[in-house]
Image (spheres, rainbow, N blue to C red):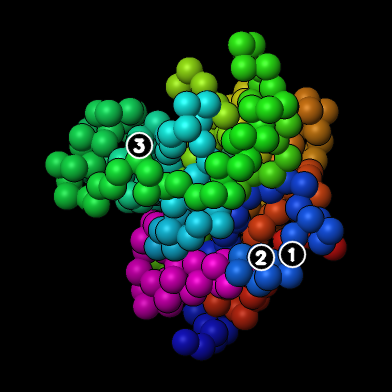
Amino acid sequence: MGTATAGEKKFGLAIHGGAGTITRANLSGEKEAAIRSDLGEALDAGYRILHDGGSSLDAVQAAITVLEDSPRFNAGHGAVYTNTETHELDASLMDGNSLSAGAVAAASTVRNPILLARKIMDESVHVMLSGAGADEFAGQMGLELVDNDYFNTEFRFNQLKAAQARSDASSMADPLQFESKFGTVGAVALDRHGNLAAGTSTGGTTNKRFGRIGDSPIIGAGTYADNRSCAVSATGHGEYFIRHAVAHEICARTRLAGESLEAAADHVVRKELVEAGGSGGVIAIDRQGHVTMPFNTEGMYRGLRMSDGRMSIAIYKD
Ligand code: ASP
């Protein structure tokens, strides 16, 4: 797979694996290498599709599926635990060409929630399905179903126990009060046809209760794509991302206020969210192939691969 030559349409993708207190001091060399390898595999899976003329939607889906299957991210296998030691998965996907979208909230048995979001978009008249109904639809669509304990990992279980030890179980304590690392995954892509797409997948927040749903499956908050502006996938403290309609806000600033992608994303992530107290970050791409990945935390797992040769995988601020 080479890079595109001059005059050819630019294409490529960017991915994230969550933002938070990710520093060299708290990430072992071994874990860092494994995470970088997962991110590389996800970028390759998406890039291959784009290189061969496939759609940005397919590329986003392929990249996210790789990360959902890795135990190292808070999505699919490796998702965080709810307060009752189960997993409830959220995901969404959007096509910037048609503004079609699919989203799933609180599914518990579909192995790859991003594939279900795609089915909801392509095969149903709805945008969002939730809970048992979403799992039932996944079964009808022939998607792989698993027992909820397929999503178990020891690392996330220990995280739950630590969170529960710190919070008062009888209160409505903010589940994110003590959470400093978000492992949600997402991808944004531009294909050879000039179409944008975005997708996001997560287990939500550790120790969540009462059917809590964050920004990731909400179109306009955690995910948005519109060929007239840009494609965005977010990660962070979901309640703030919902209130600020982060993904849509960034796209709207580029489309309506004429801001560059970088300026728009920077304003929302590093000014608006910071002022409000919402931590996290986004990845964004536009039709010209600009990519920006701002975050207001110590680090964000991220990477990009573009047809003009740009390629990077990064974790920390510097
Ligand atoms: N945004 C996600 C949520 O609030 C969490 C994350 O990004 O890890 O559910």
Q: Counting other residues with Cα less than 10 Å from the Cα at mark 1, is it few (<14), some (14-19), or many (20 or more)? A: few
Q: Which mark is residue 108?
A: 3
What span is in magenta? 36-61
Which amino acid is tagged 2?
A: Lys
**x, y percent for residue 263:** 76, 47
Residue appearing at x 55%, y 53% in the figure: 73
- Between the residue at mark 3 and the residue at mark 1, the CA separation in whole angstroms equals 31 Å
Secondary structure of the residue carrying tag 2 is helix
Query: Does the residue tagged 1 have its C-beta within 8 Å of any atom of ligand 1?
Result: no
Q: Tell me where residue 52 sits by quadrant.
A: bottom left
Q: Please state if 190 lies on the left or on the right of 250 as rendered.
A: left
Secondary structure of the residue carrying tag 1 is loop
Q: Counting other residues with Cα less than 10 Å from the Cα at mark 3, is it few (<14), some (14-19), or many (20 or more)? A: many
Query: Pointer 2: what residue?
Result: 31
- Between the residue at mark 1 and the residue at mark 2, the CA separation in whole angstroms equals 5 Å
Which amino acid is tagged 3?
A: Ser
Query: Pointer 1: what residue?
Result: 28
Sequence-earlier tag: 3 or 1: 1
Q: Please state if 62 lies on the left or on the right of 161 as rendered.
A: left
Secondary structure of the residue carrying tag 3 is loop
Instruction: Confirm whether the magenta stretch covers residue 52.
Output: yes
Instruction: Confirm whether the magenta stretch covers residue 115.
Output: no
Image-quarter location of ligand 1: top right
Residues at circles 1 and 2 in contact by the CB criterion of under 8 Å: yes
**x, y percent for residue 290:** 64, 61
